[in-house]
Image (cartoon, rainbow, N blue to C red):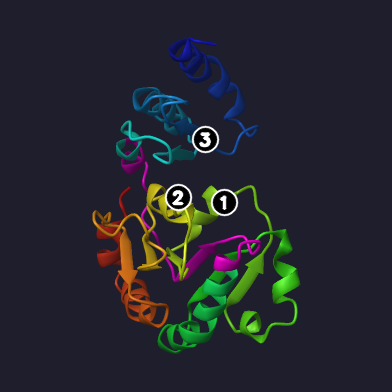
Amino acid sequence: SGRPDEYIDTICRDWLPDVSGGLADSVDAFCEDIGFSAAQCDRLFTAARQLGLPVRLHTEQLSNIGGSRVAARTHVPSEGTRLLLVGPFRYAANRDGITRFLDEAWPAIRRRVPSATLLILGGDEHLEFTRDAEAFAQAGVEVRGHRDDVPDILGASTLTINPQQSIRGSAVKLVESLAAGRVCVSTAAGARGFAATAPLGLVTAPDVASMVEPIVALLADPSRRHALEAP
């Protein structure tokens, strides 16, 4: 306690070589005022990459101490046509937003990009709302419950969506997407708090139906998408 530099040195020197042979599949770091500094995370990630270990960074949800620069150096560009929504169904705004997206936007997206898929992380409570709902049975749509590997799922996605029509507090799912280097297409209402200074990776639409055009364009143009991605 109170000696973070020594702790990072110990991990890099002693622990990582021991676990890189199969005991660990990745290295996570928390870069915040209450966690580790950008320099400390950078040292950890440099050592991890030298041993062939993938890295994942959680940063800039609570503070701005340079974590995005570390993330940019570890960024892997997106591939494919996979959309992701992280939104527990216990919140009505998430349920209402995704239901409207499936009604007003998803059919048009699938017609124009037949390979598109949509993964919804709706929490373990999602079955109460999705079991008999036709909207969630559409081609290309998959709903899963609670997952502990959200950073990995984010990394495997092409872009994320945020179709909320109302929001209270901060848009955590949006911040997580941008920190992971994935473009987020959001309604203007869902991007509350970012309208004045929207990051490059945040693409907004006036309403749910209007999300179709930017999503289709970004799926069809990887170079444009990659230009917006770097965290």
Task: Please tell me in which quadrant of the rendered image residue 5 appears.
Answer: top left
Camera-near label (3 vs 2) is 2
User: x, y (%) of residue 106?
Assistant: 49, 82
Discs 2, 1 touching: Cβ within 8 Å? yes
37 with respect to 144 (left or right) = left
Real-space CA distance between mark 2 and mark 1, rounded to the nearest whole angstrom:
10 Å
Of pointers 3 and 2, the one earlier in the residue sequence: 3
State the residue at coordinates (62%, 60%): 88
Q: Residue 150, which numbered label?
A: 1
User: x, y (%) of residue 187?
Assistant: 39, 70
Amino acid type assigned to the residue bearing label 1 in the image: Val
- Read off the residue under disc 3: 28
Real-space CA distance between mark 3 and mark 2, rounded to the nearest whole angstrom:
14 Å
User: x, y (%) of residue 54?
Assistant: 49, 40
Where does the magenta region start and end? 70-94
Vertical comparison of 28 with 173: above or below: above
Nearer to us in this view, 87 or 74? 87
